[in-house]
Image: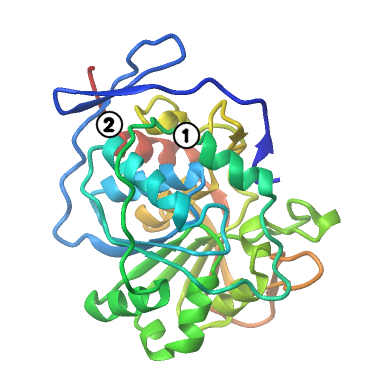
């Protein structure tokens, strides 16, 4: 399953001194400060991150915000994910304060899941809010934009030619945009999503191929069938455990580690890495991929003929670790 239940971990402490964030480990020792982000490239790609703000999502958001070839122009939060906007805006405020990064616009989703969707287990939703592994700085929660997520995505697609969406949760809002504003949806250059499974799936006995997809399988299927190119990072190729390039990183290195609900694998960070490295860290199979809406929700199948959906079948984890380490660079505390 996507998150496994563990005992409540020790609360992480943090202080703000001399304008720097100083996260502490369990022994009260400073683990290091996050260095200045690499300078943005002139041709950085505009990106909206669509995320349900679970701990591994927060690591992926930090990576994309700091990556030199990515220009994060906003974050959308679907109502069908693990963490909604009410709690998510507080998590984002603490995250951006801890990594000392300017805020970005946030739009909240309002679209309901389709009839075949399966809500995330309540204990997961509660656990990742109470104990994500993020330093609790008490930052003032962000205020969302007045526009809903669909309207915000449509606006960004019009304003930023070549916009990409990196989707780290259920694809509810993207599917709604495709249905309600098809002309604006077609302006999106590409979608990279962490969703779906090839093979047996995560929990086939309960009809779960993969949880992001199962939360709204009709939306996942609609995005795969739509006019925008899609890159899918399914759960299979992502190894279990904390990536080496994340483990030593200040602030984000504790996300989803020894917490109430731990992250057994960092699927969302891998998805961000695949996008930011332009696929150089992944093996992919392109074709006419579809996903089950009932049965084993989110289970992927490759059909006959050509298609524009790319599914990642393998990862160069050493190259991804090198990219994580470079983007999450540290300085001495």
Q: Is 147 situated left or right of 174 in this image?
A: left
Q: Nearer the viewer, mark 1 or mark 2?
A: 1
Picture quadrant where residue 190 is located: bottom left
- Secondary structure, mark 2, is loop
The outermost residue toward the bottom is: 183
Residue 203 seen in this snapshot: yes
- Secondary structure, mark 1, is loop
Q: Is 217 situated left or right of 108 in this image?
A: right
User: In terms of sequence position, does the residue under pointer 1 or pointer 2 come before the other?
Assistant: 1
Q: Is 278 situated left or right of 170 in this image?
A: left
Disc 2 crowd rating (10 Å Cα; few below 14, some 14-19, many 20+) is many
- In this rendering, is residue 275 above or below 290? above
Q: Which mark is residue 329?
A: 2
Disc 1 crowd rating (10 Å Cα; few below 14, some 14-19, many 20+) is many
Identified at 53% across, 20% down, the residue is 10
- In this rendering, is residue 18 above or below 78? above
Q: Is 23 situated left or right of 78 in this image?
A: left
Identified at 35% across, 41% down, the residue is 95
Q: Which mark is residue 255?
A: 1
Foreground of the two, 131 or 156: 131
Q: Quadrant of the N terminus?
A: top right
Picture quadrant where residue 24 is located: top left
């Amino acid at each position: 399953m996507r998150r496994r239940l563990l005992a409540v971990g020790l609360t992480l402490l943090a202080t703000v001194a001399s304008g720097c964030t100083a996260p502490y480990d369990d022994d009260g020792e400073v683990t290091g400060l996050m260095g200045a982000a690499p300078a943005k490239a002139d041709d950085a790609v505009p990106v909206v991150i669509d995320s349900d703000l679970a701990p591994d999502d927060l690591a992926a958001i930090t990576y994309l915000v700091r990556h030199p070839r990515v220009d994060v122009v906003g974050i959308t939060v679907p109502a069908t994910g693990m963490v909604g906007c009410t709690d998510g805006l507080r998590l984002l405020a603490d995250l951006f304060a801890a990594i000392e990064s300017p805020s970005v616009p946030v739009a909240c989703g309002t679209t309901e899941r389709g009839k075949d969707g399966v809500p995330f287990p309540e204990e997961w939703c509660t656990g990742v809010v109470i104990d994500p592994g993020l330093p609790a700085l008490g930052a003032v929660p962000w205020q969302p934009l007045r526009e809903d997520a669909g309207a915000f995505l449509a606006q960004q697609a019009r304003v930023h030619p070549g916009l990409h969406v990196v989707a780290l949760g259920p694809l509810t809002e993207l599917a709604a945009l495709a249905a309600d504003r098809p002309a604006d949806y077609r302006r999106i250059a590409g979608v990279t999503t962490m969703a779906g499974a090839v093979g047996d799936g995560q929990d086939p006995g309960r009809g779960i191929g993969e949880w992001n997809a199962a939360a709204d399988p009709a939306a996942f299927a609609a995005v795969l069938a739509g006019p925008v190119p899609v890159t899918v990072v399914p759960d299979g190729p992502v190894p279990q455990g904390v990536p080496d390039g994340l483990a030593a990183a200040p602030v984000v290195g504790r996300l989803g580690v020894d917490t109430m609900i731990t992250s057994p694998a960092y699927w969302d960070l891998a998805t961000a890495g695949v996008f930011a490295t332009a696929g150089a860290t992944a093996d992919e199979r392109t074709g006419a991929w579809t996903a089950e809406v009932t049965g084993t929700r989110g289970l992927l199948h490759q059909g006959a003929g050509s298609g524009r959906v790319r599914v990642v079948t393998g990862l160069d984890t050493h190259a991804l670790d090198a990219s994580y380490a470079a983007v999450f660079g540290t300085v001495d505390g």
